[in-house]
Amino acid sequence: MLSAHDWNEPMSLRVGVDLGATKIQTLLVADDDSIVARKRGTTPVTGGPSAVLAAVKETIEQLLIRADQPASAVTTIGIGAPGQIDVAAGIVLQAVNVAGWDQPVPVSEIVGDMFGVPVALANDVQASIVAEHRLGVGRGRANLLGIFCGTGVGGGLILNNDLWLGTGAAGEIGHTVIVQNGNRCGCGRNGCLEAYAGRGALEQAARQQHQAGRPTMLFELMEQQGRSRLTSRVWLDACLQRDELALELIAQAARAVGTAAGSATNLLDIDCVVIGGGLATRLGDYFLNDVRAAAQPVLLRSDVASQIVLSELGDDCGALGAALVAGDRLSQR
């Protein structure tokens, strides 16, 4: 618990949900944007959207139990989800990195019926960049780009202090093509940034090379840690132990992110690029320094490479941003 609220007084709370391919991060957020409680759940890998939303419901219920707060204290819920979002309709159109989610789902309506409160839906990285802009490393900056590397690669844009949505998919830098006819991406296209810097793509490349006889400790570390996937922690540990394949693939990812960050900065003349997501956050300055080095020769103004920075809010970023977005929309009703 981070806040110092008087627990004997009734509270007006928002729930923020960061729905990822592997985890469901939830926060209970007070009116002053302080975090009251946290609870993390696991995203189901079978059962499709219905199983995922049931897990979201269970995680929120556990969050309220942890905070000793009734559901009636919740005024609104914000959900940051990966993939293509119809913000106005509250529908996740497609989330290719969430197992079985290949059809439109009215998430706001379903979760709203579960809890009887308004539910605001946002793209996960768009929500994250809102949090960094208001409460994190982007405070005081008018123009930000977020590049968040997790299972996939997502992006979000703040322009002139406002979240820029375009027709709904603004900032989707993960599906910017950086290599013509390059690696196949989960979206079905070739050469996307996500195909070089997403954890899913990195694992696929590692498996292919390992099966072809390339030595690596990645999968041994994965088993030792009781994981079924190459998590961000596995990648970090392999890099710290100087595993050649891990170092090579992470360097490739950093070069791809740096190239994309530099090109986007040239286009938009933004103040700051925020690098976040589970993979980038876990690797920290090790990853950031390589991203900056890759961006340097791309940038028209080389002095702005130092404005490529790590997310300050870490694992809280997406859920906190979702709660902020939900509060904004509730106030506009």
Image (tube, rainbow, N blue to C red):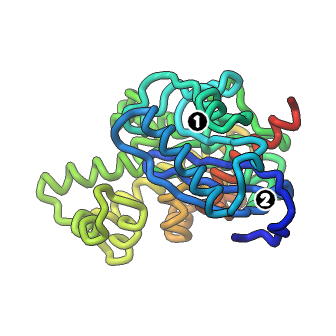
Mark 1, residues whose alpha carbon is within 10 Å: few (<14), some, or many (≥20)? Answer: many
Name the residue tied to disc 1: 172
Mark 2, residues whose alpha carbon is within 10 Å: few (<14), some, or many (≥20)? Answer: some
Q: Residue furthest left?
A: 213
Quadrant where the C terminus sits is: top right
Q: Earlier in the sequence, mark 2 or mark 1?
A: 2
Q: Residue furthest bottom?
A: 241
The amino acid type, in three-letter code, at marker 1 is: Glu
Residue occupying image coordinates x 58% and y 25%: 106
Q: Position of residue 63 (x, y in %)?
A: 61, 57
Nearer the observer, 128 or 107: 107
Q: Position of residue 172 (x, y in %)?
A: 58, 35
> Is residue 310 in view from this perspective?
no
Quadrant where the N terminus sits is: bottom right
Left or right, 71 with respect to 101, comes to: right
The amino acid type, in three-letter code, at marker 2 is: Leu
> Is residue 45 in view from this perspective?
yes
Residue occupying image coordinates x 64% and y 59%: 316
Name the residue tied to disc 2: 135
Q: Position of residue 291 (x, y in %)?
A: 54, 59
| 269 up-or-down from 224: above or below | above
Left or right, 236 with respect to 274, comes to: left
Q: CA distance from mark 2 to mark 1?
A: 22 Å
Give SS at disc 2.
helix
Left or right, 54 with respect to 172, comes to: left
